[in-house]
Amino acid sequence: MEEQEQRKIEKPRRLAWFDPAGKSRGVRFRLGCLTGFVLLIAGICLGLMNLWFGTGRYGKELFNFYFTQPGLVLWNVLPFVLLIFLLWALTNRAWVAFLATGSFTLIYSWAEYWKLLARSDPIVAEDLTVISEGVTMGARYIEVTGSIILSAVLVLLATLLFFFFFRGRLPRLPFRLGLAALLIAAAGLLYGNVYLDNERYESYACWEPLNVWIDSNQFISRGCMYPFLNSIQKAVPSPPRAYSEAAAVYLLEEYETDPIPQDRKVNVIVIMGEAFTDFSQYTDMITGVDPYADYHAVRDQSIHGTLVSNVFAGGTFNTERCALTGFPFLTDFRRASWSYARYFADQGYALNGSHPGYESFYNRNSVNANLGIEQYYFYENHYDEICDDRITPDAILFPEILRLCREDLKQKDYVFSFNVTYQNHGPYATDTVYFSEVYVPPQGLDGETYTIVNNYLSGIADTGAQLRALTDELNADDTPWVLVFFGDHKPWLGDQNIGYEALGIDMTDGSIESIHNYRDTEYLIWANGAAKAKLGADFCGEGPAISPCYLMNRLFDACGWEGPSFLKFSRQTEQLLPVICLGDYYIVDDRFLYFDALPNVLQNAAMRMHYVSYFLTQNGGVLPAAKTK
């Protein structure tokens, strides 16, 4: 009788393996070991899943390439393994640890995949500083594929398996806390000695089919999580190597800041055109209506040249802030910094600017103020009242820029206005025709590509028309006006850059031509008759190919202004290094070179520019006084 009662209360032996509360220490130990082993496999699988999505459009071929360099696979997968075990130690629930790690993996992997397909651009640490911009804009690129659905299903099924079967627990709290501390310490050591080790990072080869000179290609050739962790050091503002504040001050003190002579002052409007580039110089497929006719009419009456941008199909703020500050090396501008706007304010100019997008995009509302432009007009504080559409077209924006400038001229004698457009921002519709004229005929293009390309060129044609209308109105004005217009980057033309391929524009073969195809936009500096007469210059001719950080150099030279001490210093650097690219790359004598490949004299010039740029972002926006001679 007692034996029968005992059998009733005993748990079946076949379930003991899965019972974390079982009384047998051996059962608990075996279950803990099994759960830990399965978690290890699960962490590796999540890391490999992330690595797969990080290949973007290249898929299996690039994924296989990773395994030719085992270190790449290890450094990409290891963070997921460490995270899943850390969460297990903290929660003592394997299913919670897996679900949290799996959810993070899915969100990060999908975002990486969508961004790569849409812009051929991976997620880097700096993107986290503009996460609201990314969420808002990224929603446009979301495409749910079979791989995405499968990955979500697998994570859900694996979570259920852990919940019902692999329920092993770790020993008591002191052991768990000790394990968590050990994992955190290991992660810290790995981060400092592996993920921030640039020599190790650069030792891994770039996948041969990709253009090694494109930053995003180098990133995805090294996986997904590994290069992301390596990029953190670039996102956090830090002094350049061997930085010396005294050296930076000494370099600037060599030059005096000269005021703009009263008899040479003119009004300045700067407009950065979103995704504006002149494709007529890259392809002969624009055989319909010329979308650049109005733009060329203005360009031919201007100083014009090539602007070698740092970014492609995104990262607008980089070109924008390089141009406004003159710095090729940027920080987050979380504090007051020097800029050319501050120089114009010191000369008695009124300052304003417009961007008809949201003020939080790229943190423009605070950054522009830190760069000296307190009065800036965004969607929230101005353009929502004058335009029913969220995207204010250039037909409204350009006249409004001029109207705001004329309002400021009622208070001050001269105005400096720095503006960023929104029209022509991608993606461009693939299934809706917005163009009324055909610019690229359909022959040789599939339906979506035909629509994308012609929708883009329709917007560009309108921007050119508005630019010409603006210059016509300024020409009729007796007030002296100088207009600077430039593009921020090449446009998005469909997933996997299909539009570029259709137009016969190659960006992948690694030649200097393909690098320019990827990076180049244009700039022009135009003046009305009153400004030409006042400055004694014709404002015509071709200018050099330059980085955006030298754009103000071209303006000041065109106007015959000596300018601030930083600009004088920058002129010396421009003579040696006219093109400084993001990631310490340089174009010298039509060659694309790493910093380490530069001759010593050019390395020194780059380091001096880095010192001075960094110093001016940290000192409250004040230029040091020149030395007493």
Image (cartoon, helix red, strand yellow):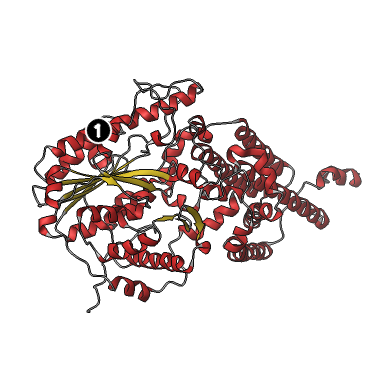
Q: Is residue 41 left or right of residue 126?
A: right
Q: Is residue 12 left or right of residue 515?
A: right
Vertical side of 276 occupied by 532: above or below:
below
Q: Where is residue 534 drawn, in percent x and y?
A: 12, 51
Q: Where is residue 609 drawn, in percent x and y?
A: 38, 65
> Which residue position holds label 1?
466
**Residue 392: in sight, yes or no?**
no
- The residue located at (43%, 21%) in the rendering is 441
- The residue located at (60%, 59%) in the rendering is 201
Vertical side of 203 occupied by 121: above or below:
above
Count residues near mark 1 (Cα–Cα under 10 Å), then give few for <14, some for 14-19, many for 20+. Answer: many
What is the total number of numbered labels drawn onto the structure image?
1
Q: Secondary structure at mark 1?
A: helix
Q: What amino acid does circle 1 point to?
A: Gln
Q: Where is residue 490 drawn, in percent x and y?
A: 42, 40
Quick one: 72 or 389, which is closer to the camera? 72
In the rendered image, the quadrant that contains the N terminus is: top right
Quick one: 517 or 65, which is closer to the camera? 517
**Residue 553: in sight, yes or no?**
yes
In the rendered image, the quadrant that contains the C terminus is: bottom left
Vertical side of 112 occupied by 370: above or below:
below
Residue 283 falls in image quadrant: top left
Q: Is residue 434 left or right of residue 351?
A: right
Quick one: 99 or 354, which is closer to the camera? 354
Quick one: 199 or 422, which is closer to the camera? 199
Q: Is residue 290 left or right of residue 100?
A: left
Q: Where is residue 628 drawn, in percent x and y?
A: 22, 79
- The residue located at (55%, 42%) in the rendering is 508
